[in-house]
Image (spheres, rainbow, N blue to C red):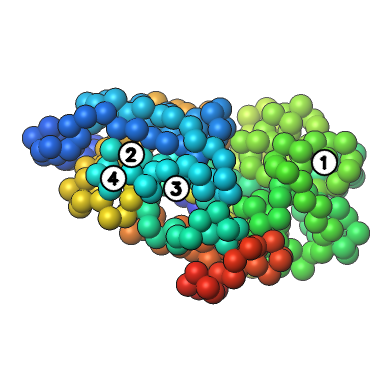
């Protein structure tokens, strides 16, 4: 699995940034874009995918000198309603789809019949996962927790097959710990369960936990990334890799939130959008948003982004199948095992 990028990724040097801006100038882009663009987010307004799509789209709109209108079309299975709508539009670059790594499971969950490679994606990034415990648990370090994890300790990590659940499974595989996984409908109820003592351990993202950690409702033990993280008002949260370096065989499994167009869009459209997207991520507005929201910026586009999503599609789909939580055998869809 690809290693997580640093918090503030330097995507372009000043010279390269100038070149990117030139590449999306009206002269270079020729006829595209000649009118406004629509970005259809597959999740509800106000969520993480929606917010970052609005932040990045605003900057791309300034670069491209057109409006990018962000709308929401939630519903279906794993974002399938919004994806199906965008996939039914012309492959001309005027309709984007705002999506996340969870969308790779739409096919195996019966939401639609397409592999994820029908998209040409642009990955903004995501917030890293962290393992924390109930404030009264008595655990002070990840080593303390792992040594006590004999299968009797309850752990929450959103729903079965979610990225947080996969990170919990990777932690177990990499350390030999055994937890009793309790699935919940999402990150918020998982964290509530940890705070109330229904479970002892919770794995969700730093962005989702940070206020609860600051308030003393959760105690952070380790980041599930190669690097530690200093949380303002709390201090340095160590990396799980410090105590268990063998975790690099299993982690990190990172969020991949961003947008996409149809893979069969014209090459010049892909090039124009890629340059605008890359330049947008380098703006002060996006960089500052990333810092304030504990986001790791990725900036992958095109083939590299497709490779990242293909890896996630394989991992997520086969994990769901092995957990008997999938409707369709990944093999029938041509999804290779991880």
Q: Which of marks 2 and 4 is nearer the N terminus?
A: 4
Report which residue position mark 2 lands on. Answer: 95
Of marks 2 and 4, the one in the foreground: 4
Position of residue 202 measured from the top left corner of the image (x, y, whole percent): 76, 46
Report which residue position mark 1 lands on. Answer: 194
Report which residue position mark 3 lands on. Answer: 84
Position of residue 124 measured from the top left corner of the image (x, y, whole percent): 43, 42
Q: Which residue is drawn at 51% across and 48% down?
A: 80
Q: How far apart are marks 3 and 2 (CA)?
A: 12 Å
Q: What element carries label 1?
A: helix
Is residue 83 left or right of 27 when viewed as pictured?
A: right
The quadrant the C terminus occupies is bottom right
Classify residue 43 by image quadrant: top right
Instruction: Tell me the crowding category of disc 4: few under 14, some 14 to 19, or many 20 or more residues within 10 angstroms, Cα based.
Output: few
Of marks 4 and 1, the one in the foreground: 4
Instruction: Tell me the crowding category of disc 3: few under 14, some 14 to 19, or many 20 or more residues within 10 angstroms, Cα based.
Output: some
Is residue 61 left or right of 317 when viewed as pictured?
A: left
Image marks 1 and 2: residues in contact by CB distance under 8 Å: no
Report which residue position mark 4 lands on. Answer: 90
Q: Is residue 252 above or below residue 280?
A: below
Q: In this view, does 330 lie above or below 211?
A: below
Image marks 2 and 4: residues in contact by CB distance under 8 Å: yes
Q: What element carries label 2?
A: strand
Q: How far apart are marks 3 and 4 (CA)?
A: 12 Å
Q: Residue at x 72, y 36 (%)?
A: 188
């Amino acid at each position: 699995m690809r290693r997580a990028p640093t918090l503030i990724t330097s995507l372009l040097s000043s010279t390269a940034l100038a070149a990117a801006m030139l590449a999306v100038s009206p002269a270079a882009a020729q006829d595209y874009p000649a009118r406004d663009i629509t970005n259809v987010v597959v999740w509800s307004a106000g969520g993480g995918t929606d917010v970052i799509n609005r932040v990045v789209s605003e900057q791309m709109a300034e670069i491209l000198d057109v409006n990018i209108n962000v709308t929401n079309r939630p519903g279906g299975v794993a974002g399938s309603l919004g994806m199906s709508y965008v996939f039914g539009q012309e492959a001309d670059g005027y309709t984007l789809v705002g999506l996340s790594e969870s969308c790779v499971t739409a096919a195996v969950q019966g939401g639609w019949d397409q592999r994820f490679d029908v998209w040409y994606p642009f990955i903004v990034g995501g917030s890293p996962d962290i393992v924390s415990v109930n404030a009264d648990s008595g655990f002070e370090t990840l080593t303390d927790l792992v040594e006590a994890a004999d299968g009797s300790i309850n752990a929450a990590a959103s729903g079965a097959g979610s990225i947080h659940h996969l990170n919990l499974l990777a932690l177990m595989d990499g350390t030999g710990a055994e937890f009793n996984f309790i699935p919940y409908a999402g990150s918020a109820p998982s964290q509530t369960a940890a705070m109330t003592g229904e479970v002892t351990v919770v794995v969700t993202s730093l962005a989702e936990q940070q206020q609860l950690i600051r308030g003393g409702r959760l105690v952070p033990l380790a980041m599930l990334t190669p690097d530690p993280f200093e949380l303002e008002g709390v201090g340095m949260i160590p990396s799980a890799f410090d105590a268990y370096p063998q975790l690099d065989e299993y982690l990190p499994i990172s969020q991949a939130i961003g947008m996409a167009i149809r893979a069969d869009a014209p090459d010049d459209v892909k090039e124009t959008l890629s340059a605008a997207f890359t330049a947008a991520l380098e703006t002060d507005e996006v960089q500052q948003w990333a810092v304030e929201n504990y986001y790791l910026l990725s900036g992958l586009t095109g083939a590299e982004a497709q490779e990242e999503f293909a890896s996630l599609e394989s991992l997520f789909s086969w994990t769901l199948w092995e957990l008997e939580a999938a409707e369709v055998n990944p093999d029938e869809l041509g999804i290779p095992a991880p």
